[in-house]
Amino acid sequence: MFWDQESETLNRPALEAHQVKCLRDTVARVAARVPFYAGKLKEAGVGPEKIQAIQDVTRLPFTTGIDLRTIYPDGLLAVDAAETVRLHTSSGTTGKPKALFFSRRDVSNAAELIARSLVMTGITKADVFQNMMSYGLFTGGLVMHYGAEKVGCLVIPSGPGTSERQLMLMQDFGTTAVHILPSYALYFAAFLEQRGIKPGSLKVRKAFVGAEPHTEETRLRIEQALGLDVYNSYGLTEMNGPGVAFECEHKAGMHLWEDNFLMEVINPATGQPLPDGETGELVLTTLKREAMPILRYRTRDITSIIPEPCACGRTHRRIRRITGRSDDMLIIRGVNIFPQQIERVLMQCPQVGRNYLIIVEGLDDLTIQVELTPAGFDGTIENLNALKAQLMDKLKAEIWVRPAIELAAPGSLPVAEGKAKRVLDKRSL
Ligand code: DLL
């Protein structure tokens, strides 16, 4: 099913011509209206006239998260302040957040991309869409809400709320689709099991998960535990929030809406572009942003482009599941480790529950606290020791470092309020 078939299936030459035109317009606008970019473009010796082909994007300067913090609050505005209608922020670890302004057209465009994304998974106006992500400065609430409303769904803005209340809303209003953090979905599945509620007794058939890194194994877990189809959704505040890239019904990579965002994958160390299919850092340029265009944004997210056409007929290329952020990479005893490698091993093990915590301390000592399922936590010392040994071996094979494993009772590890915090690196405290 298509929301905007013409845009979604535009042939590649037409799509690329559209990108070049939008890129040239964007460069012209920021050169004229944003002193931060005017200076950077002058330094690089690039103006709109130099943008003749897609590859010319590599002539443009990068924008980093640090830049966005430096120009905080409104140093990238390309419209008069009176033209802005919405503010979202992306909370960082410390200091000021990144502030993102939307014009009326930006709000409508963002909703349009969500509508495309939802409809390509089979969502229609008959769906009841429970948005279990946080409303407020985080984009997962409002941006998704506007898009689902645009499709015509009944949208329940439940926010993250308590599981008890989520369940009541699902039962009373016949929720058919949910938008949920993957870590919360695992938690919610455990909650339903505890309450003795069979997922099949609810009407929920689809879950859209994103905003945090998660593995294919986690997707399968959520699908099995909740008995529904889970679709991966990728986005970031700097690029509207959700709706940047989304899986279609084939669930084989996420279509990135290339008429709105120009994507590159670069070697994060050198900044040089990588050929399609190679893994590196995703860099995005807004093509239609009115209030706050951003050139070559270093997302820090690690992925690769799938150049092959998709069976769904959409021409917008796909990116692979994000395997981590370049700044999430742990270096332990000289080995590069992404937390997701650890998650993949843990989630394959049926005795492992929904939560885990990776702790690094001292001289690169790696400990993984692992919560078990009620069935896995059988209290027999021999079984628990055997499980520990098995996890250590499997992890050693995956990450080349043998971690210490601490098994924990179901529900005993701390749960974050928003996005899950999976790593505690005490070396940097
Ligand atoms: O998380 C926007 C969003 C909301 C996306 C709801 C999807 C659903 P930020 O809070 O700015 O925005 O965080 C963006 O989260 O750079 C990635 O590192 C990570 N991320 C987002 N989606 C995924 C995903 C929202 N599907 C940052 N897989 C991004 C892995 C993801 N990581």
Image: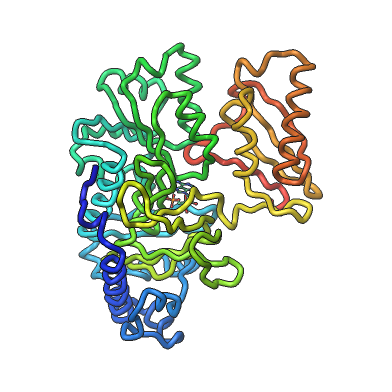
Residue 403 x %, y %: 76, 39
Q: Is residue 144 left or right of residue 345?
A: left
| Image quadrant in which the N terminus is located | top left
Residue at the spot 43% in from the left edge and 81% down from the top edge: 40
Q: Is residue 355 above or below residue 319?
A: above
Q: Is residue 286 above or below residue 167?
A: below
- Colour mapping used in the image: rainbow
Query: Which residue is at the far right?
Result: 363
Residue at the spot 75% in from the left edge and 41% down from the top edge: 396
Res 106 quadrant in image = bottom left
Q: Is residue 125 above or below residue 25?
A: above
Q: Is residue 352 left or right of residue 241?
A: right
Residue 60 x %, y %: 43, 78
Q: Is residue 188 left or right of residue 424?
A: left
Res 178 quadrant in image = top left
Residue 67 x %, y %: 47, 69
Residue closer to the observer: 192 or 264: 264
Residue at the spot 57% in from the left edge and 66% down from the top edge: 268
Residue at the spot 42% in from the left edge and 23% down from the top edge: 227
Residue 135 x %, y %: 34, 41
State how many labels appear.
0
